[in-house]
Image (cartoon, rainbow, N blue to C red):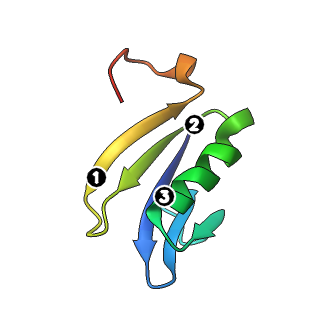
Amino acid sequence: MDKYDISKDDKGWKFGKEGSDRAIRRADTKSGATDKMRDYMKDKEGSVKIRKQDGTYQEERTYPRSSDPRRTKG
């Protein structure tokens, strides 16, 4: 399963592969980046970590939901 993350950098919010500096999608707000991520992940399988502005972990989402190894909220 591919791993992605949403994080803030000096250009705004970016959605990209975990550990990569290259963004797949960019937005001015976290909400905008999350919307673009949702759209991108429609036909993909992966795990997305969403980070707070300070870089700390906020939540993790699995796409599609049926691929989530644990049945938990969030």
Query: Marks 3 and 2: CB-CB under 8 Å?
Result: no
Relative to 47, say whether 28 is above or below.
Answer: below
Relative to 25, say whether 48 is above or below.
Answer: above
Task: Name the N-terminal-most of marks 1 and 2.
Answer: 2
Residue 63: percent from the left, percent from the top? 57, 31
Q: Amino acid at mark 2?
A: Gly
Q: Secondary structure at mark 2?
A: strand
Query: Marks 1 and 3: CB-CB under 8 Å?
Result: no
Relative to 59, say whether 11 is above or below.
Answer: below
Q: Secondary structure at mark 1?
A: strand
- Please report the residue visible at 65 percent of the width from the left and 64 percent of the height from the top: 25
Residue designated by label 1 = 57
Q: State left or right for residue 40 relative to residue 51.
A: right
Residue designated by label 2 = 46
Tag in front: 1 or 3: 3
- Please report the residue visible at 60 percent of the width from the left and 26 percent of the height from the top: 64
Residue designated by label 3 = 31
Q: Where residue 2 is drawn, which disc sits there?
A: none
Q: State left or right for residue 70 relative to residue 40.
A: left
